[in-house]
Structures are given as C-alpha cells and as structure tokens.
Image (cartoon, helix red, strand yellow):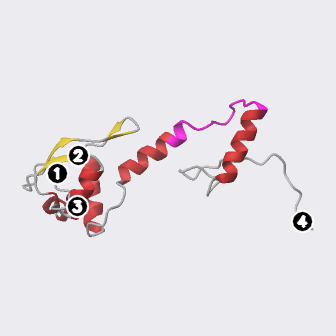
Amino acid sequence: CSRSSASSCAVQLWGWQVRGDVSAAASARGGTGGDGHGLLLVGAPAVCSHVLRVPALAEYLALLDELRGCPSPPRAVLRAIISKACRSAIMFGTQLSHAECARVVAELGRAKFPFQCAHGRPTIVPFLELPPLP
C-alpha cells in the first residue's frame, strides 16, 4: 500500500479488489465500469452478510474524491452495521426477565446516546405522564 495512492490504499483496506487506476476512477466520481477508466471490480467485501458491490464502491470513490483521498468509512459499511444493530435489537413488545431488564438498563447507561437507536428511533418509552407545571 505504501506505493499506492491514498484512494487505492483506502479501497484495499476496506476489502475491495480492483484492477485499474483507482485514483483516476475516484477523480472521475465513481468510474467503476463502462466509463472508459478501466477500473474492474474483481473482489468485493461482505459486511454483515451484505456484499458491497459496484454501487457501494462507486459511492466510496465519490466520497474519497470529495474528501480528497482522506480515508473515511464507506457509507455502505455504516448502513450495513446500523441495519444489523437495529435488526438484532430488542423489539417493542418483547417480554424480558428482570435480569434481562437490569442488563439492558446497565448497557444503556454506558451508551453515548442511550435514548435513540442508530436510525434515531426512541429506545426508551415513558411509563407515566406528569401533569403540566402550574
């Protein structure tokens, strides 16, 4: 990676295997096939069972161009992780034992944003309604 461009390095770091000039494709805003830049995807990473194919790579190349090669997590990776986190979460209506409730409350106490999930949905529901102040 030391002889490669920052974009090539970032693409390899996240698991894409490509043939061609990643820097040229990144500066062409996502040139990943059929656009004359000669970039060919030969291997794609999988995140949470979701394979990051050409659209995810094109989006990442555009992001790298926007950030001038500064490495950043691909948006497709973040979306996959966020989706997995919500899909594996405790859903409303799920019955929990007292021990499970205590564990969840303790874990929420350690979270940076305990009142919402990664999508912004509430994780805590009020149990009582307070009267308005006089």
Q: Nearer the viewer, residue 88 or 36?
A: 88
SS category of the residue bearing label 2: helix
Task: Indicate which disc residue 54 carries.
Answer: 2
Residue 77 in magenta stretch: no
Q: Picture quarter containing residue 43?
A: top left
Q: Nearer the viewer, mark 4 or mark 1?
A: 1
Q: Earlier in the sequence, mark 1 or mark 2?
A: 1
> How many angstroms separate mark 4 from mark 2 (CA)?
56 Å
Q: Earlier in the sequence, mark 4 or mark 2?
A: 2
According to the picture, the residue beneath numbered tag 1 turns out to be: 32
Q: Nearer the viewer, residue 46 or 118?
A: 46
SS category of the residue bearing label 1: loop
Q: Earlier in the sequence, mark 2 or mark 3?
A: 3
Callouts 1 and 2 close, C-beta under 8 Å: yes
According to the picture, the residue beneath numbered tag 3 turns out to be: 7
Going by the image, does 67 lie left or right of 20? right
SS category of the residue bearing label 4: loop
Residue 87 in magenta stretch: yes
Mark 3 Cα-neighbour bin, 10 Å: few <14, some 14–19, many ≥20: many
Point out the image quarter for the N terminus: bottom left
